[in-house]
Amino acid sequence: MTMPPETPGAPPPAAPSPWLVLRVWFALGLQSFGGGAATLALIRRAVVEQHRWVSEADFSRDWALCQITPGINLLALTILIGRRLAGAAGIAAALLGLLLPSAGLTLLLTAFYARARHAEAMQAALNAVIPATVGLGLLTAYQMARPPLQSLRAEGAGYGLFGVALLAGSGAAVLLWHLPVVFVLCAAGAVSAAVHGLRARRLAQRARAGSR
Amino acid sequence: MNLLTFFGLVLKSSLFSTGGMGNVAGLHDDLLPRGWATEREFAESLAVGQVSPGPNGLWVVSFGYLLGGLRGALLALAAICLPPLLVLFVERLYRRVRDHPAVEGFMRGLALAVVGIFFVVLIGLLRGGGGPGVQSALIVLASLGLGITRRVPVFLIIGLAALAGVLLR
């Protein structure tokens, strides 16, 4: 990755037109095979390195906000960057550009599959594809759990264990006790918020006692 | 199946989860008891979502098509486009509360619970799989191993599995 050094005082690149935003994101939507990580890398390369519309720091901050937004992170990122580039029209252009090719191809693949799904070979193929999806899903689960578990462990071994218990407990609550998913999600968030809030308060008290 | 209710359920489960596949658990919970979807249809659309371009969250488009045709697919697409718009609100809110520790705690707890429930979904998928147990276990391990290397594109892993399934039948 070769980046030309920032020249202080160089004029910032001109704001792109919604039409250009649409074209760039259409290309991203068409190429983004390989799931979230691959798509994120493509978007980053296009808007940070190639066109230099967004700074590295702004891109990281935007991506962090997308982690705490409901729904598909990559769509949230598309919305934030689209707005940076061309306001409300930019949001519409970026979303449309990303989704038109990718959702269209998903639809075509599904339609093709739906026609052939009763063929014996297709069923045999699917019986093997399902466990492959599960294997890849395990990897996704690991990637999703790693950031929160790492930051908890950095706060102490007890907090790390608490995180693992929260993860396992939420799974057990659904698998064994059949509690509603939304309820489990809200409860886990509330418990974790309370633990984190109490810890912060204790740290603040200790800091105050130390400064006296 | 009532398409508007379907739209509402996709919207609800996407609102209460993060990431493209976080909504699998909620939909699983809502649609299976209604008899509107089967484990098999979940597995089928998740597989198509992995192979096709774009965010993995577009599996819902495939799911909508299998359950309700073109209209189901378009409604599902609309439902997953709405929750990410909240990022505009999140950004504004973040500027105000970013220093409150409970906010970070809540997000972490939510993320961990999503993963815990995701495991339950994966178990369900395997149950609905239908292939012989040993073969399935081997494919789970092989695809996990290939995925960890990060050298093999996801759609190639899925393609290899499909080929293996056809050859081993």
Image (cartoon, rainbow, N blue to C red):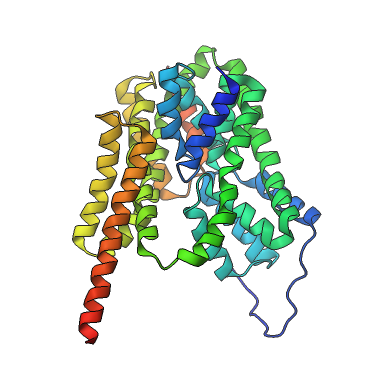
Left or right: B142 in relation to B60:
left
- Residue A209 is situated, as x and y percent measured from the top left of the image, at 20, 81
Q: Is residue B6 visible?
A: yes
The quarter of the image holding the N terminus of chain A is: bottom right
Q: Residue B128's spot in the image, x, y percent? A: 38, 21
**In the image, is residue A169 above or below residue B106?**
above
Near-viewer residue (B6 or A13): B6
Q: Is residue A95 above or below residue A154?
A: above
Which quarter of the rendered picture does the C terminus of chain A lie within?
A: bottom left
Q: In the figure, A171 relative to A204: above or below? A: above
Task: Determine the residue positioned at 39% across, 65% down.
Answer: B100
The residue at 59%/36% (across/down) is: B79
Give the image quarter of residue B145. Answer: top left
Q: Is residue A113 visible?
A: no
Residue A109 versus residue B73: which sits nearer the camera? B73
How many discs mark residues in the rendered view?
0
Q: Is residue B127 left or right of residue B65?
A: left
Among the 4 quarters of the image, the one containing residue A128: top left
Residue plotted at (56% across, 50% down): B86
Question: Where is residue B109 drawn, in percent x and y?
Answer: 34, 50
A136 and A12: which one is in front?
Answer: A12
Name the spot of residue B114 as percent of width and height, x first.
38, 43
- Left or right placement of residue A111 versus residue A11 in this view: left
The front one of B164 and B133 is: B133
Q: Residue at x 35, y 37 (%)?
A: A183
